[in-house]
Image (tube, helix red, strand yellow):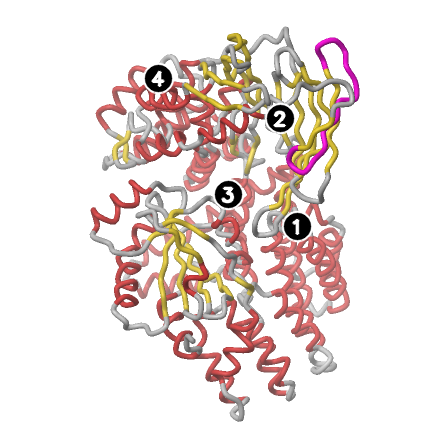
Amino acid sequence: MKVRDSAHIEETYLFKSLGKEANGDSEFEVKLVAVNNSAVVNGIREGVNTNDIKKTGFSSSSVILTMALLYQPLYITINPKGELIKLTGFKELVKKAAVKWQLDEELTTMIAEDEPFINTTLQWFFLNLPDKRINYNAEWKWWNSTFKVTGIKGALLEITAKPDSAINTISGTYLFNDVTGLIEKANTRTLFKADNGSQWVEDYAQEVNYNATPVVTDTAWINMAVKMSSWSDALRVNNKPKQKELLAYFKENDKPFRNDAHYRSRKLSMIQDLDDKNKSNTYDSLLFSTPNALLTAMPHHTSNKLLKIMDNPAGSLDSALAVTRFFYTSDQFNDWVQHSFSQDFKPWDEAGNRDFLRKRDSSEAAIDKAMIEIKTNHKRSRQLLQMYQAAKEPLLIRKKTEALYLWVLAQEQKGKPQSLINIANKLGKMTEKDMLLNNGGRYNLLVYNLLVDAKRIKEANSLLQITLQKLEANTADELNGNRYADQNLLAYAYYLQYLAAKPADSVKALKYLAKAAAYSPKTKNQEDVTSFYDRSFFLNAKESYRDDFIQKLFAIGDKEQALAIIAEHLNANPQNIADVQELFTKYVPERSFKDFFAKGVVGIWEPAPNFKLKDIDGKERALSDYKDKWLVLDFWGTWCGPCRAEMPRVNEFNNQVVGGELAGVNFMSISCYDTEEKIKSFLTENKYSIPVLVSDNVVQRNYKITGYPSKILISPDGGMLPVKHGTDWRAVIKTFSQLYAAN
């Protein structure tokens, strides 16, 4: 039987009837025999496709569970009402996989806890029935929906489901086998609503195929791939390779897997992790002896190969182009172009570089050598960029580097205004999609500045207007994964428009500065790695233009709007509270900063989602338990390296809270993707005393946690402020609690 859901996950199960009990219960043996839930994310294969098992990605623990389930029998009992009342064999199956693959303890516990998920998955093959046997026109209700038999063809019953409510309902059609109890065909839509009010729809299709022949999967490959993954302790201890065992494993498996991309890529990664002073040389030798086609499983190795070719003055540019052809679709290629390669084309000051090296006591001979190396590197990069633009296939390489190439040409045409204008026109004709591919916003703004320097103001303004329109569109596109980078470019573009309009009418120009402030990042999610390179290495832009706007508003006497922007700025950068307070006192001395902070800043925070979770001793706690007090919520996990690294400071902070040093402040941590045993062991081993709640795997989604550790400040009134990583949250909560005392 094959099923397919909204996420385009296909699973095929083999059912074998084992007969019926006297009470009407039916027994089945069930095997998962095929899966297709794979996708390419950022150039890396994620998930499993048993039709192409060797392209499996292993970043998710769910992949290990799928591998463990393949072809292994489970046994289920279904009662006459179609309810799955018993599932056996799952725990034994997990234990068997844990022993065979030497899975780490945490993962074994995690996938063992997935039994309810497997139970739910298998339940979908059976229809929930009323107490009495159904026949033509029979109706019954289940899950806020009405089910009705609309036709009968022998043992097959045609059934429709219609919703009785607006939420938590099922609609669609079924073909139900009254003899086997299995749904032979289904096309349904289920509407869910969570406790926090969020809703989602899940489409589901199912069909029986009596003559299906499952693909036989390469179990030797699966065993290799799992053992070499980070989920297995077979070749690792404390997440570090066991050198002796690893080298023996390579000796045994190099020949059978010599042409396997996953094996060759994983081997390179494990060599990098070795505690060996010669590992760099070993890695480089292995990297260059590995065919490009066998590096595709892990694009960062392809990126490393390209970097090493370009860093070597004797490295072949034809080889660099050949390597590029094997990873140009990945995010690693995009990052290399926009973060590294593009820096070779920035104007550079040879005299300034020489002076810098002299101050570091470098000899003139060494300085001369360094200058030659830099010039050689720049020349080679320019030649490779030309090769990218000359490449007819694949076209995507040319498209991804076209904007960079035009900017390089523009720098070379500084003394030729018409050539510069022609280049600007080419950039202006790029579509929004093109700009997404090649970070066109960055290069448009760089060429705009070149036009301004060349006194071609009309053409510069034309390019700026086109760029603003396209950045606006890309920023508004929620499917654009780079929209925050585009948003930050948009803030700088409006700042440039403000500077251009300011000489003619400084007051009217403020509307552009207002937009620059509005598009400046307000939360940690709106920051972007690419924006750092755009801002710091190319455009000399600011991270935020709110300060500029605030100063101007105060200067023209618009205090209320200035205060609104101050609140927005402080919520985005709470560590700047001392500067904000000083600014407030300077321009609004007649008002209380404490009152403004309570009403204008904390008062506009979003309400914190409620939760009820159990701590590691089984005691239930809710968000409401901390009402009228400040609360620091810490989302973390024992598996998280940065979380473990900062835990001494977190524990010290908690001790201060418990000791009464921070009046009106509470602290609570929520451990995610963890087990009670793992948490207790970690706390005991390190003598930490922090309170810990165990996540229900919903709370972190409700709080929109995207990385670990993450801190959330919750006010006495229940508003929340996510604190971006790197902020001194201890200093922030101390100051905040003094300005706005708990009730």
Task: Tell which circle, 3 or 1, labels the residue nearer the N-terminal end.
Answer: 3
Q: CA distance from mark 3 to mark 1?
A: 38 Å
Residue 144 falls inside the magenta stretch: yes
Element under disc 1: loop
Could you say whether the residue bearing mark 2 is in a helix, strand or loop? loop
- Label annotation for residue 478: 1
CB atoms of marks 3 and 4 within 8 Å: no
- Which quarter of the image is occupied by the C terminus? bottom left
Element assignment for label 3 = helix
Residue occupied by mark 3: 380
**Residues tagged 1 and 2 counted as in contact (Cβ below 8 A):** no
Secondary structure state at the residue bearing disc 4: loop
Circle 4 Cα neighbour tier, 10 Å, few/some/many (<14 / 14–19 / ≥20): some
State the image coordinates of residue 440 (x, y, percent, origin top left): 65, 52
Q: How much space separates mark 1 and mark 4, taking CA atoms?
A: 45 Å
Nearer-N-terminus badge (2/3): 2
Mark 2, residue position: 128
Q: Quadrant of the N terminus?
A: top right
Q: Quadrant of residue 179?
A: top right
